[in-house]
Amino acid sequence: MSSDAPLVSTVIPAFNVAWCIDRAINSVLSQNYHPLEVIVVDDGSTDDTQEILANYKEAIRVVRNTNGGLSSARNTGILEARGDYVAFLDADDWWLSGKLSAQVTLMQNQPKIGFCSVATNVEDPDGNFLNRWDCPKWQGSFLAHLFHNNAAVAGSGSGVMARRELFQEAGLFDEHLKSLEDIDMWMRLAAISEYACHPDTLAVILKHPESMSRNLEVMRDAAIRVMKKNRTLLPLHLQDSYWRTGLSSVFADYAKWEYRAGMRSPSLLDILQAFRLAPFSRGRLCLGLLKDVLLGRPL
């Protein structure tokens, strides 16, 4: 790597992650890209996380926080970062070889790109492959695409690298959101810059099977809030029916997940909300969902 290569700051939030933090850190330190700084934000851990971090000595920079949550830890890392680029990695996920060099090359070759991510594998805690989170396909505005496809940014909080200067304009992660703070940030970045995705699988994220059903209500409320708070980021001509169609899809998605979790009444209410928002563009979908839920069919 040339001596004038841009510095990449990796931000890893850590809260009671003694069981996995070494895997995440090692996956960063083993990257073939330099210069690199690794910032681990210990968000008030009470397990053996601090002892494990101490073993890395000068190889990483540890910042201690009182427990403020994921967004707070990421924001601390951004403010501490000295790099031209900031790359995010959750403590229970890890990167594959060549991730950083691929992303830096992509962004160096295309200066208009403000943030990028990579195709990502999803595994369960036993190491079983669940699915591949592919790069999105879209035409036109990526911001508009995000409003109809909230999970479009492959890898999300463990796949994204962004130009550090953009956070001065877009702001930091919203610490009032209890979930989907990453989608909120990608919307704000997409409003001021371009996005790209490297098609190679260069990250792995861990999916805990029980996490979605346990946090379903929190995620639903955050998704609705994110859609509403960022509505004005869209061009004026997309803030009406286009936006309502996107919000309708959010209600329809959560209706399906609620039904699968045995929450039949909330599911029915969300189907009706989805229909009310976009009866013409999402009406057939909503009526189909309503029929399946009323008849007790599997979704």
Image: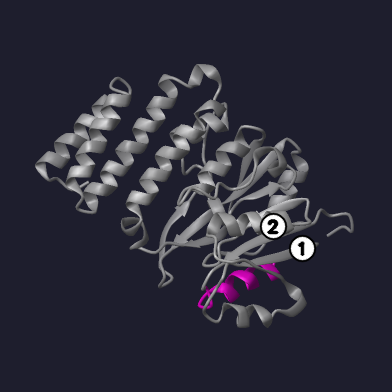
Q: Nearer the viewer, residue 162 or 167?
A: 167
Inspect the image, locate mark 2, and give the three-letter code of the amino acid beneath it: Leu
One can see residue 201 in this view: no
Nearest to N terminus: mark 1 or mark 2: 1
Query: Which quarter of the figure is the N terminus placed in?
Result: bottom right
Residue positioned 44% across, 19% down in the render: 240
Q: Is residue 24 part of the magenta span, yes or no?
A: yes
Of tags 1 and 2, the one toward the viewer is: 1
Residue at the far top: name it: 237
Label 1: how many residues lie within 10 Å, few (<14), some (14-19) or many (20+)? Answer: many
Residue positioned 52% across, 62% down in the render: 204
Helix, strand or loop at disc 2?
A: helix
Q: Main secondary structure of the magenta part?
A: helix
Reply above or below: 251 against 242: below
In the picture, measured across the screen, residue 278 lies left or right of residue 35, that is left
Numbered label attached to residue 100? 2
Q: Quadrant of residue 275?
A: top left
Q: Quadrant of residue 115?
A: top right
- Mark 1 vs mark 2, CA separation in Å: 9 Å
One can see residue 46 in this view: yes
Q: Position of residue 52 (x, y in %)?
A: 61, 81
Q: Is residue 287 part of the magenta span, yes or no?
A: no
Inspect the image, locate mark 1, and give the three-letter code of the amino acid beneath it: Leu
Asked if labels 2 and 1 touch by Cβ distance under 8 angstroms, the answer is yes
Helix, strand or loop at disc 1?
A: strand
Q: Which residues are magenta?
A: 17-31
Q: Position of residue 16 (x, y in %)?
A: 51, 73
Q: Nearer the viewer, residue 267 or 249?
A: 267
Reply above or below: 237 against 294: above
Label 2: how many residues lie within 10 Å, few (<14), some (14-19) or many (20+)? Answer: many
Residue at the far front: name it: 66
